[in-house]
Image (tube, rainbow, N blue to C red):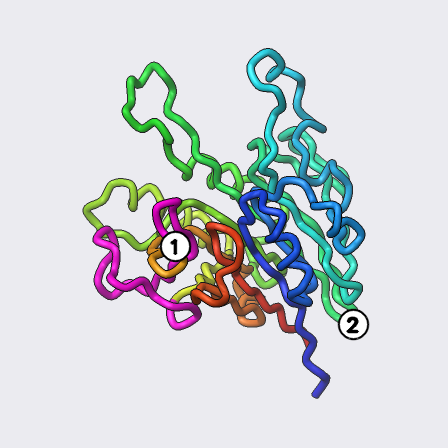
């Protein structure tokens, strides 16, 4: 029996906070899947490798249609970040949503929703790592909708379409994909809630592609007390986000999730570092993902 090797992946929406970058460096992990990353603080530069800008910056493949509307296109990018020399990382640069890409490219259909790379552990098998950020999309003005913030499932379905390019067989065991991030969805609400039906269309589609929902789910993290009214009493959801009116102690919403290819998922574990002591300097807690390989 060979020695079990573990690659440690941290998934975290860091809300552009510099102290989150510093905490990330202290963890001793191998790879980070970040959302709302922002700029690397000066004292962390050289301690992390964010790869080429083309892997996260959508300016690279978009036209300049946003000029006169926005100062810049977006600054809350998802990223795949190398944290240790125990792995090599080959980043995929973003290109427009074309049907055929080069070996080092990924076609993306949403701005600021995805970043992807191939992670190659020392003495281990490579896997694809994807950072996901399901940004809210406002309804079109013609709808006269009162939903000012909008909905995240539109972004999530774009992300799924982009990930599907890494799936080249109906046999999920031929794929080694870990995809995690802030999807802004709960996935286990009450059946009479129409928004929950929309959210489940995301997990149903992931499942159809052979991507298993890993959670985290209780006991891989603490549950909210009391249980939020919009969730069933037996929910296994674990809070990963708190609003500006809340704190880690009162957080009650799970928005962050991890998926892995069916079959490969038996080698992947995930838990939420959502205790008050472990939460960290962001409105989201960290997900700790361990990928085992013998």
Residue under label 2: 123
Q: Which mark, residue 94?
A: none
Q: Is residue 265 left or right of residue 166?
A: left
- The local secondary structure at tag 1 comes to loop
Asked if residue 159 is positioned above or below residue 140 in the image, the reply reads below
The residue range painted magenta reads 218-247
Q: Main secondary structure of the magenta part?
A: loop
Of circles 2 and 1, the one toward us is 1
Camera-side residue of 253 and 41: 41
161 drawn magenta? no
Residue drawn at x 43%, y 30% is 137
Q: Residue furthest bottom?
A: 1
Camera-side residue of 252 and 80: 252
Asked if residue 242 is positioned above or below residue 262 in the image, the reply reads above
Residue drawn at x 51%, y 51% is 282
Q: Residues within 10 Å of mark 1 (few under 14, many from 20)?
A: some
229 drawn magenta? yes
Q: Position of residue 167 (x, y in %)?
A: 60, 50
Residue drawn at x 76%, y 46% is 51
Q: Position of residue 153 (x, y in %)?
A: 41, 39
* Image quarter (top left, top right, bottom left or bottom right) of the N terminus: bottom right
Camera-side residue of 162 and 156: 156
Residue under label 1: 247
Which is more N-terminal, label 1 or label 2? 2
Image quarter of residue 114 = top right
Asked if residue 228 is positioned above or below residue 192 in the image, the reply reads below
Total marks in image = 2
């Amino acid at each position: 029996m060979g020695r079990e090797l573990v690659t440690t992946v941290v998934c975290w929406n860091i809300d552009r906070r510099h102290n989150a970058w510093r905490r990330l460096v202290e963890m001793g992990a191998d790879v980070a899947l970040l959302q709302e990353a922002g700029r690397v603080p000066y004292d962390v530069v050289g301690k992390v490798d964010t790869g080429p800008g083309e892997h996260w910056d959508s300016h690279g493949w978009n036209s300049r249609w946003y000029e006169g509307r926005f100062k810049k296109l977006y600054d809350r990018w998802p990223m795949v970040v190398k944290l240790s020399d125990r792995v090599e990382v080959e980043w995929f640069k973003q290109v427009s949503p074309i049907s055929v890409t080069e070996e080092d490219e990924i076609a993306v259909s949403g701005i600021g929703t995805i970043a992807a790379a191939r992670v190659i552990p020392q003495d281990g098998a490579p896997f694809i790592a994807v950072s996901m950020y399901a940004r809210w999309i406002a309804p079109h003005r013609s709808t006269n909708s009162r939903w000012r913030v909008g909905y995240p499932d539109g972004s999530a379905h774009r992300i799924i379409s982009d990930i599907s390019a890494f799936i080249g067989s109906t046999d999920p065991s031929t794929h080694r994909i870990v995809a995690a991030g802030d999807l802004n969805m709960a996935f286990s609400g009450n059946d009479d809630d129409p928004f929950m039906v929309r959210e489940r269309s995301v997990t149903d589609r992931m499942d159809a592609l052979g991507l298993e929902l890993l959670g985290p789910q209780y006991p891989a993290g603490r549950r909210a007390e009391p249980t939020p009214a919009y969730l069933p009493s037996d929910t296994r959801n674990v809070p990963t986000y708190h609003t500006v009116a809340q704190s880690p102690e009162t957080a009650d919403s799970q928005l962050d999730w991890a998926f892995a290819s069916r079959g490969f998922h038996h080698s992947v574990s995930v838990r939420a570092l959502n205790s008050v002591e472990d939460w960290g300097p962001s409105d989201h807690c960290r997900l700790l993902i361990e990928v085992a390989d013998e």
